[in-house]
Image: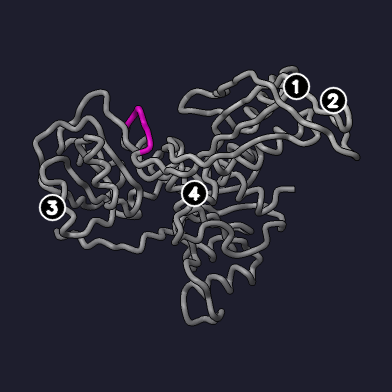
Amino acid sequence: MITVKSILDCITEIAPLSWQESYDNAGLQVGDLKAEAKKALICLDVTEAVVDEAVAKSCDVIVSHHPLIFKGLKHITPNTFVERIVTKAIKHGIAIISMHTNLDNSYLGVSHILAQKLGLSNLRVLDPLQGKLFKLVMFCPVSAADRVREAMFQAGAGCIGNYDSCSFNALGEGTFKAGDGCHPYVGEIGQLHYEKEVRVETIVPEHLLNGVVSAMKKVHPYEEVAYDVYPLNNDYPMAGAGMMGSYETPLSETEFLQRAAEVLGSPCLRHSALTGKPVKSVAVCGGSGAFLLPCAKRNGVEAFLTADIKYHDFFEPDGALLMVDAGHFETEQFTKELILDIILKKIPTFAAEIAEANTNSVHYFVKH
């Protein structure tokens, strides 16, 4: 049976909830994780129109990018649109899942698909997260080292960039004395034992640590496994804010602006002063990403595209690059397509579709 949790797990596999920002409220918003899920409606924002569409299409799950509930509700009444949506969702047995800054911070997330739509290649995270990696050090007898190491790799340990199965191994000698009630793999009760062992060191992402340790213990021959876990401050290239990439053939600034407007369907683009430089390397951040401007400048890109840029922020590029505000909805619209693709790749037979309701809260008046 496919459950609400099954749908949540599809997305958190590439965008763990531990990657969300401290202010965020990603995850299950309404409903029961154990409930059966038969059909999902995908949207950027949960509006009353989206819930009505879900009801009409017999969808029992809504998956959105922006959370419906950002802060605690003190009552459930018809007085606000959030409370009305929660009431209607509960009444019709609809679960609501939101994947927000955890999906923003995923290498395969919001900014990644935006960069792809703009035709950029050689993609990498603009501002990688730190403190999300651990070093796992494990000690085991020489004869068991290969199978224990492989179990750790299969559980997700040992990935550095495009390399996997990475570890450092050193031979040594361990000592231990088994007490009463023990069942030692080697050695005798009450006698000091010396054993040739391998010290295996490898890298593990935070969200996979428990699984890697469990896999290690499952195949390790010792009754009591000796291991250490150390937090690291290394950059984690698979998670972080924004994305940067490049064009094989540079564009002029006006060509880049034209491409962005056409791809995003933006009625207008706000941007800083043109620099006159050809655009080859570009940084992007779906949604509100003005905070990444210093990082974009440090990386030497010629253009930085994001949304929700304040008036005075347009002075900050100072001729170093072209900064473009393409709209919040516009830069995140492909997230719907991304979420749908993630779910269907994991559960191909599941019924899911993108909502037809337009949830862009910003409207434009175009002068004729």
Circle 3 SS class: helix
Instruction: Give how far apart the Cα atoms at labels 3 and 4 are.
Output: 31 Å
Q: Nearer the viewer, mark 2 or mark 4?
A: 2
Q: Is residue 322 above or below residue 34?
A: above
Circle 4 SS class: helix
Q: Mark 1 or mark 2: which comes first in sequence?
A: 2
Q: Amino acid at mark 3?
A: Phe
> What residue lies at 46% left-to-right and 44% top-to-bottom?
131
Q: Mark 2 or mark 4: which comes first in sequence?
A: 4
Q: Mark 2 or mark 3: which comes first in sequence?
A: 2
Instruction: Give how far apart the Cα atoms at labels 1 and 2 are.
Output: 9 Å
Q: Nearer the viewer, mark 1 or mark 4?
A: 1
Which colour style is shown?
one colour
Expressed as whole percent of the image width and height from the top left, the position of residue 163 reads 50, 23
The residue that label 1 is drawn on is 195
The residue that label 2 is drawn on is 187
Q: Specify the principal SS of the magenta part.
A: strand
Disc number placed over residue 315 in the picture, else none: 3
Q: Is residue 133 left or right of residue 142?
A: left
Instruction: Give how far apart the Cα atoms at labels 2 and 3 are.
Output: 72 Å
Q: Are marks 3 and 1 in contact (CB under 8 Å)?
A: no
The residue that label 4 is drawn on is 19
Q: Amino acid at mark 4?
A: Trp
Image quadrant where one finds the C terminus: bottom left
Q: Are marks 1 and 2 in contact (CB under 8 Å)?
A: yes
Residue stretch in magenta: 120-125
Q: Is residue 164 magenta?
A: no
Disc number placed over residue 106 in the picture, else none: none
Circle 1 SS class: strand
Q: Is residue 103 left or right of residue 179?
A: left
Q: Are marks 2 and 4 in contact (CB under 8 Å)?
A: no
